Amino acid sequence: MIKISSLLVFAMLLNSCASGYKKINPETINYASKNIESNILLEYKYDLLQKKYKKKETKNNIKLIAVKIINNTEKEIVFGRDFKLSYANGNEVSLIETQKLFKTIKQSPASYLWYLLLSPLQFYSGTSTKSNGYYTETKPANTFPIGLIVGPGLAGGNMIAASSANKNFKNELMQFDLNGKTIKKGETIYGLIGIDSNSYDSIKIMVQ
């Protein structure tokens, strides 16, 4: 049999498995919040991340927001130059640089090395009894070093899964980076922005 303490450690570690990354796809979102200013339409949505990415977002007081911007003006406009985002009170929204946003929210593949703590785990099967006339000793007849398979296997598997999820997360953040984005007349663009906030504040267009 496997010792109870080993089972508890095993269950604890299994609850810390790497998370996959579910693509946000800003183009497909049903946006509920909107604002229009000087013929520039903004729609946006909070609550985009799941699992470990959501936990890291909350832990670091960050909000990832999907935005949809439609240029209904008569000219080409540039995000960050011709217009920015502000809160309802008029204060400018300070956006987190994309690389910094990724590094803050991403999973840490190296953290899954602690699965190697399972390496000493032994599987015991059967018992043998030995008597010397004074007392009887019962001990496992066979042992198998299951930890040498389970520990490295879970560590490696989770590190690969976390790295793959991080890659997908980073690619989507870079794909929808709005910094300096040019929006042509009549064009609709989509983006992902990060802000330092622990609340779901209303945001709006602020024309320069």
Image: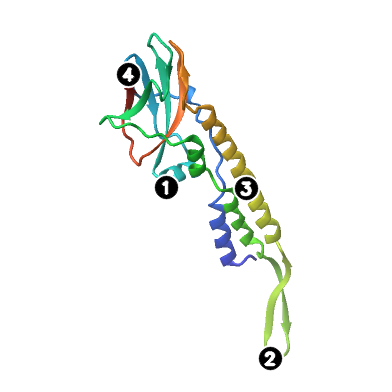
Q: Are marks 4 and 2 in contact (CB under 8 Å)?
A: no
Residue farthest toward the left in the current orientation of the protein: 89
Marks 2 and 3, how far apart in space?
A: 53 Å
Identify the disc placed on residue 36.
4
Q: Is mark 4 on a helix, strand or loop?
A: strand
Marks 1 and 3, how far apart in space?
A: 21 Å
Kind of residue at disc 4: Ile
Of the pair 28 and 195, the residue shown nearer to us: 195
Marks 1 and 2, how far apart in space?
A: 61 Å
Name above or below for residue 196 compared with residue 43: below
**Residue, disc 2:** 134
Marks 4 and 2, how far apart in space?
A: 91 Å
Task: Determine crowd level at label 3: few under 14, some 14-19, many 20+ residues with C-alpha closer than 10 A.
Answer: many
**Residue, disc 3:** 159
Residue farthest toward the bottom in the current orientation of the protein: 134
Name above or below for residue 158 compared with residue 115: above
At x 63%, y 65%, the residue is 2
Q: Which label's residue is closer to the chain start, 4 or 2?
A: 4
